[in-house]
């Protein structure tokens, strides 16, 4: 008896919503609209991390390696950021923070810039909105790296906040575009053709 292949739904709307939410909340702190990271933590863990991880696992089931690596890669990033912020609250003890070398975080941001750079090249085959999101994430990691290494810290941190806000707006838009296309059976919010066909 021939088994039917399981059809897995497109998880992109969920992953993009998670990215939109966490960058919106995180940008509010960098732009000085809110204080501290204590209440950014839940959004980093559940939306930034878990929503993107779930989307990534479903993309692997759909054999969408690009989407899976992107969602899981950034989902793990936000989990790492959340634990870093937890350490800064002192919840893991003062000794950990006293021995912390912030340059290590700078190198982590640098590594994610490299990751994002080749993912941005891969995004040239997707659509203009998604490519723009990846391009903005490249700039975000440049600003985060510079800020963490103390290079023009005030400007770099503010620029990172503006970049996160733009990432959030585009991610909400692309998530809505996916939802509307599924619900109405046609493309209502345009995303643009792939920069490279």
Image (cartoon, helix red, strand yellow):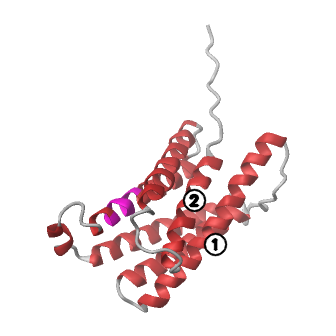
Q: Is residue 169 visible?
A: yes
* Prevailing secondary structure class for the magenta stretch in the rendered image: helix
* Image quadrant assignment for residue 20: bottom right
Boundaries of the magenta span: 79-85
List x then y, in percent, for residue 189.
Answer: 81, 57
- The image shows residue 143, relative to residue 184, as above or below, that is below
- The image shows residue 73, relative to residue 159, as above or below, that is above
List x then y, in percent, for residue 64.
Answer: 59, 45
Tag 2 residue? 21
Q: Residues within 10 Å of mark 2 (few under 14, many from 20)?
A: many
Badge 1 marks a residue whose secondary structure is helix
User: In this view of the protein, which residue sits in the foreground, 23 or 70?
Assistant: 23
- The image shows residue 196, relative to residue 149, as above or below, that is above
User: In this view of the protein, which residue sits in the foreground, 71 or 102?
Assistant: 102
- The image shows residue 145, relative to residue 173, as above or below, that is below
Badge 2 marks a residue whose secondary structure is helix
**At 67% across and 66% down in the image, what residue appears?**
169
Decide if residue 100 is on the left or right side of residue 71: left
Tag 1 residue? 166
User: In this view of the protein, which residue sits in the foreground, 45 or 191?
Assistant: 45
List x then y, in percent, for residue 36.
Answer: 40, 72
């Amino acid at each position: 008896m021939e088994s039917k292949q399981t059809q897995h739904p497109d998880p992109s709307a969920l992953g993009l919503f998670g990215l939109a939410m966490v960058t919106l909340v995180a940008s509010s702190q960098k732009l000085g609209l809110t204080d501290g990271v204590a209440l950014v933590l839940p959004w980093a863990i559940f939306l930034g991390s878990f929503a993107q991880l779930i989307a990534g696992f479903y993309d692997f089931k759909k054999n969408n390696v690009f989407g899976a690596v992107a969602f899981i890669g950034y989902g793990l990033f936000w989990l790492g950021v959340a634990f870093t912020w937890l350490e800064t609250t002192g919840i893991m003890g003062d000794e950990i923070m006293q021995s912390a070398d912030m340059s290590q975080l700078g190198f982590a941001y640098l590594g994610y810039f490299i990751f994002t750079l080749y993912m941005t090249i891969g995004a040239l085959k997707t659509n203009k909105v998604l490519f723009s999101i990846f391009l903005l994430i490249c700039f975000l990691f440049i600003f985060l790296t510079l800020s963490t290494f103390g290079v023009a810290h005030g400007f770099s941190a503010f620029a990172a906040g503006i970049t996160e806000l733009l990432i959030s707006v585009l991610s909400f838009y692309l998530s809505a575009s996916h939802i509307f296309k599924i619900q109405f059976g046609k493309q209502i919010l345009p995303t643009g053709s792939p920069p490279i066909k």
